[in-house]
Image (cartoon, rainbow, N blue to C red):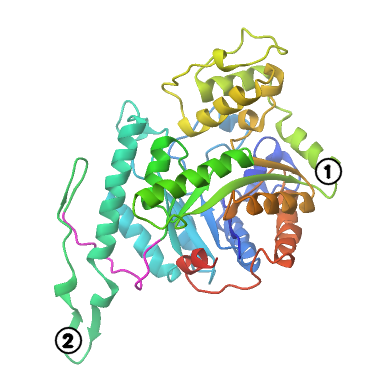
Amino acid sequence: MSLCIGLTLSPTWLNGDGWRRADSNIEQLFSSQYYLELAKRAEAAKLDFVFKPDSLFLNKEIVNKTPGHTCLDPVVMLTAIARETEKIGLVATMSTTFSEPFTVARQLQSLNWISEGRVGWNIVTSIEGSENFGQTVMPSSKERYERALEFTEVVRKLWDSYPNEALTMNRTSGQFTNHEIISPVYHKGKFYDVAGPLNVPAFGSESIPLFQAGASDLGRSFASFVADACFVAAPDMDSALELRRDLQRRAHEHGRDSRAIRVLPGMHFFLGETREEAQQLYQDTYAHLTYEQRLAAVQRILGVDLRHLSLQSRVTAKDIPEVMENVRSRTHADLLRRIIINEEPTLQALLSKPEVIGSAHWVVIGTPADAVEEIIKWYRHGALDGIIALPGGAVQSLHLFFEKVVPLLVDKGLFKQEYHGDTLKAHLQNK
């Protein structure tokens, strides 16, 4: 068994006050060389892929104090990386809410040629950004997922419309392609009307792997139908187990192999040579957040104002709406709601939760050995097929991940020493 491991190319270790550290290299944030060096280091460690998240909006209040959602375009960035790497997979995030199927199909297939089969598509429905695309309000979650399903169907049709075997390139006969096997798609649906065919042939015979991250009911249904791998925001092992089993059940109901989807929780780790050092790193990372900012974060996630409660008051199910409307991310809201129902924390404890001050991901604070122990525990309980590495706090977490966590996983027989294929599809199938 080899775990599937990917590394985010969004520098999560710069969040909070991490970017202010002397060794943050923050001045290189918009340099392609910065990300190329990360990708090369990930390839040297034999990671399966690097993954570039994306957002299509900018909150100028957030970027006053932290890098926030400022980022280079994923396809442009990964194209630069493709030219300088050989094996590692390149997963690009592209939105189905603010893009067109033909454009996405063409860009990804082009990048697939440039990288020689190493591309993956992280399908997102977007939760903000409507004002940048001529829309006054965001479509509902239901509409976004309906659109995503049709969008993905059209992209797949376009990829199939110009198969690789159509390329004959026969100099003697003068035939460049067997045009009889190039087929228009003639798609007419609720949201899209696309004739096709695509004007870029498929690279080889392998399909481009699809990734998805939604954990809401609609997101799970969509992922179980189309995804080869699912990024999971799971704050604890029980929630990861529940989601993995649910995805397997839904995949089976769709007629797929229940094991077809590789479940990859995001692991947000704050690492130190000692546990005390790691704990201090975590505390320092979020020390800048005020009481008001933490309350505002809860309100942003759940759509509820808890300012009337004292710090020692218990936050229970009665304090949050049974049906949450107009929340920014239903996935994040569901996770935080479950924590409140199950734990009934004090307001003070709630405002210190990683799901409030950081993200809804699994958080590990400790030494590299502690991180490996956690990964092994989750794996043995059947909660994961791999991880998305999200280093936190400072660049030291990234260094310790490469220098100690990955080698320890190799020593324990849970991660490969060498690549066993040349494409992302091959990496995902190496179980």
- The answer to whether 107 is drawn above or below residue 15 in the figure is below
* Quarter of the figure with residue 92: bottom left
Q: Which residue is drawn at 29% across and 74% down?
A: 164
Q: Nearer the viewer, mark 2 or mark 1?
A: 1
Choose between 285 and 273: the one closer to the eye. Answer: 273
Give the number of the disc on residue 22: none
- The answer to whether 234 is drawn above or below residue 258 in the figure is above
Coordinates of residue 20 in the picture (x, y in percent): 71, 39
* Quarter of the figure with residue 199: bottom left
For the residue marked with disc 1, what is the amino acid? Answer: Arg
Q: Specify whether residue 342 is painted magenta.
A: no
Mark 2 residue element: loop
Q: Which one is earlier in the sequence, the residue at label 2 or at label 1?
A: 2
Q: Disc 1 designates what residue?
A: 275
Residue range in magenta is 195-208
Residue 106 lies left or right of residue 248; in this view the side is: left
Q: Disc 2 designates what residue?
A: 174
What's the distance in space between the residues labelled 2 and 1, CA to CA? 68 Å
For the residue marked with disc 2, what is the amino acid? Answer: Gly
